Image (spheres, grey):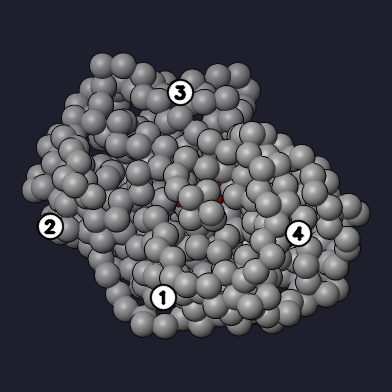
Amino acid sequence: MKKILPLNHGLRGTIKIPGDKSISHRSVILSSLATTPVEIENFLSGADCLSTVECMKSLGAKIVRTGENILVTGNGLHGLREPENVLDAGNSGTTLRLLMGLCAPQKFLTTFTGDNSLRRRPMARVIKPLTMTGAKIFGRNDNQSLPITILPAEKNLRGIFYKMPVASAQVKSAILLSGLFAETPTTVIEPSPSRDHTEKMLTAFGARIEHRGNAIRIFPAENLTAPERIFVAGDISSAAYWIVLASLLDDSDVTIESVGVNETRTGIIDVLQQMGASIELINQRTSSGEKLADVHVVSSKLYGVEFGGEMIPRLIDEIPALAVAAAFATGTTIIRDVAELRVKETDRLAAIVDEFNKISPETFTATDDSLIIKGGREKFFAECQTRADHRMAMSLAIFGAAAQGVSIDDETCVDISYPNFFEELN
Ligand code: S3P
């Protein structure tokens, strides 16, 4: 249980946020497929990325801490070893789906499991395309959920042409990773662009990838050539809490340093700017193939907006934080095309409606695939449940801090993506 008091002053100063969760996962996975050691700087030591580290160790990579960094030494693209035990992805959909793509073409058996939340999440979306390559993958019951077993591939798998029904970077990445081992090139087409960290990092490791519109084609590879060092950009999904809070509180002036501003991730900044937020990207630069900037935010008055479609994959993880911003805005905000929120760490549409309305009654309503927020209603102190979802916990915390305070049942779930969130908030 944790109680967050209302903040009666603005946020001022400079914040450094932890490394990007998506990039951290990919940095360990690809480094484990090289033959030369890779030092990863600003790696996110959150529980999700540590699940990936443990799985890659079980697949034969050597991964050690070197002070603040981690050092990964792999056995080459075709040098993965059969794990001696079940691979546990914990709470992490990214670990599970990317590693299913990596393990599907291997000549050994792999079984995956995960925590209560991950065991309920849909995996058919990744089993289906991987099965088209010839891989033999079996999940539990009709949903093909965890535990999932991948049988040893008897021969090299086929390259596929796959049109994805939903924009999902995890599914896209699973298909691309499996494509590295196929007989022929693999093409995946997204309905709208999702985060492209896998493509960027595969290119940095020398894989051949071509883009045409929303189609991405990957060619089979003999080996990967690793950079000596990868710098992981700060996580814009973690920065989002401070961007929203600084916008809402009077007298705020905050700079968040070294934030990843890859265009497939900056929807949160675009939408907040449309709402009237004062956000500026300064000191823009590129590191390890990803764009970085310092994000400068000052207090502002916000107005409701309406958006959906291609914007959604660019801010999917920031919708709970954005919903907090919308609750303080003048007018109504309508967020369309967000059915995917129902299959995140928890059903986030239901969680937002049930828990956020405790703080600001009659503010949040949802349909099957949209969220409507009537801004400007009265806010109260409330006791809320995080549903073991890290992003719900942090969004509730900033909601309470900007309103009349909040108490949350479980603060430890922030470990997944932002272990020192509450120290930073203090
Ligand atoms: C992620 C992709 C997104 C996102 C998740 C991380 C990734 O999920 O919500 O937190 O690292 O590829 P989907 O692929 O399900 O859209």
Q: In the visual, does 99 lie left or right of 220?
A: right
Q: Which residue is mark 3?
A: 113
- Mark 2 Cβ inside 8 Å of ligand 1: no
Mark 4–mark 3 CB contact (< 8 Å):
no
Q: Nearer the viewer, mark 2 or mark 3?
A: 2
For the point 50% across and 33% down, which residue is it? 91
User: Are the residues tagged 4 and 2 within 8 Å (C-beta)?
Assistant: no
Quick check: marks 3 and 1 in contact, CB under 8 Å?
no
Q: Quadrant of the N terminus?
A: top right
Give the vertical position of 383 relative to 241 (above or below).
Answer: above
Residue type for callout 3: Thr
Q: Is residue 175 visible?
A: no
Mark 4 residue crowding within 10 angstroms, few (<14) / some (14–19) / many (20+): many
- Amino acid carrying mark 4 in the image: Ala
Going from the N terminus, do you reach mark 1 or mark 4 first?
1
Residue at mark 3 to residue at mark 1: CA–CA distance = 38 Å
